[in-house]
Amino acid sequence: MYFFRKKDPNRPSSFNLKVMHAINATAILVFLGGILYKLIEYLLK
């Protein structure tokens, strides 16, 4: 149940964690964009 627990107000907000999440989100978007590009390229041939 890791994903469904409430945020702990006593836990400090970490800058490194925020940066890690931003980089992870960017990587996922680039990956999905690449798959979409290849799919469109394949369909237009």
Image (cartoon, grey):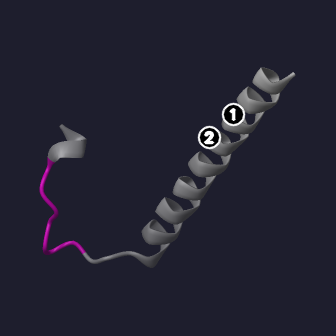
| Residue located at (38% from left, 75% from top) | 14
Seen at 57% across and 46% down, the residue is 28
> Does residue 31 sit above or below 17 in this rendering?
above
Of all residues, the one furthest to the front in this rendering is 44
Tag 1 secondary structure: helix
Q: Could you tell whether 18 is left or right of 3 in the image?
A: right
Report the predominant secondary structure element of the magenta stretch.
loop
Q: Quadrant of residue 10?
A: bottom left
Residue 28 highlighted magenta (yes or no): no
Q: Provide residue 38's location: percent of width, then percent of height.
A: 77, 31
User: Magenta residues, as a range?
Assistant: 5-11
The residues bearing labels 1 and 2 have C-alpha atoms spaced at a distance of 5 Å
> Residue 19: x percent and y percent?
52, 70
Evaluate if marks 1 and 2 touch, with contact meaning CB atoms under 8 Å apart. yes
Q: Residue at x 52, y 55 (%)?
A: 25
Residue at numbered disc 1: 35
Residue at numbered disc 2: 32
Q: In the image, residue 5 lies at what x, y percent?
A: 14, 49
Say above or below: 12 vs 27. below
Looking at the rendered structure, the secondary structure element under dot 2 is helix
Residue closest to the eye, 28 or 3: 28
